[in-house]
Image (tube, grey):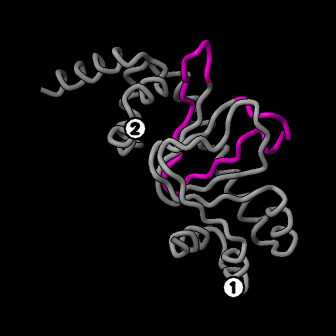
């Protein structure tokens, strides 16, 4: 797993052996079982997540119903807003597959960034990429129909179709599971 991590980091900055050893000494790797909740609504946290293997999702519970807002898979990073704002979380984070995550905390990040300037540079670059990606996803969601959202999902993240339960996919798309079934049938009919 460490090779996967270092290959990812190499896209942004080059690391010395000392820097690699520093990362490894932090004991960041965590195996997490499917179904485990990493963060609950109302809970405070300092933890950020980087998915090496598996899938996690964020969701709210509104009027007793789960509303999925995002899926994070291999090479995706998640820093819940409560970590930055130092407030209780407004949503849940849970694993929908057995996962291997890098889990860091804000105190550790400050310490490492102060010792190694390139980590701070890499984090800034990752943050900028993530912000741009989230803005594009938000704009696409707001300006597209449910069918367009599903077709975008098929094009950009086809792995989610097989990995994520249908009711969670439907919630993510902003529709009911029955509507997703009808939508899939309509798309298949158009292809035939």
Query: Which secondary structure, mark 2?
Result: loop
Q: Label for residue 151?
A: none
| Residue 86 shown left or right of residue 132 in the figure | right
Q: Is residue 151 magenta?
A: no
Stretch in magenta: 61-90
Look at 47% across and 42% down and name the residue there.
Answer: 96
Q: Quadrant of residue 119 in the image?
A: bottom right
Percent of width and height locating residue 174? 49, 20
Q: Label for residue 164?
A: 2
Total number of numbered labels? 2
- Residue behind mark 1: 16
Which image quarter is the C terminus in? top left
Q: Residues within 10 Å of mark 1 (few under 14, many from 20)?
A: few
- Evaluate if marks 2 and 1 touch, with contact meaning CB atoms under 8 Å apart: no
| Residue 184 shown left or right of residue 54 in the figure | left
Look at 67% across and 87% down and name the residue there.
Answer: 17
């Amino acid at each position: 797993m460490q090779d996967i991590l270092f290959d990812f980091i190499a896209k942004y900055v080059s690391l010395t052996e000392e820097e690699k050893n520093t990362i490894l000494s932090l004991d960041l790797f965590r195996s997490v079982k499917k179904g485990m909740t990493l963060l609950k609504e109302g809970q405070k946290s300092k933890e950020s997540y980087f998915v090496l293997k598996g899938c996690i999702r964020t969701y709210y519970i509104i009027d007793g119903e789960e509303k999925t807002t995002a899926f994070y898979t291999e090479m995706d990073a998640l820093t819940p807003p409560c970590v930055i704002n130092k407030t209780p979380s407004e949503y849940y984070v849970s694993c929908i597959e057995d996962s291997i995550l890098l889990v860091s905390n804000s105190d550790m990040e400050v310490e490492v960034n102060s010792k190694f300037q390139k980590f701070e540079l890499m984090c800034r670059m990752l943050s900028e990429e993530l912000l741009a990606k989230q803005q594009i996803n938000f704009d696409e969601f707001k300006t597209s129909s449910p069918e367009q959202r599903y077709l975008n999902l098929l094009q950009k993240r086809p792995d989610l179709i097989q990995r994520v339960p249908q009711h969670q996919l439907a919630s993510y798309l902003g529709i009911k599971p029955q509507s997703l079934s009808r939508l899939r049938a309509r798309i298949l009919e158009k292809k035939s």
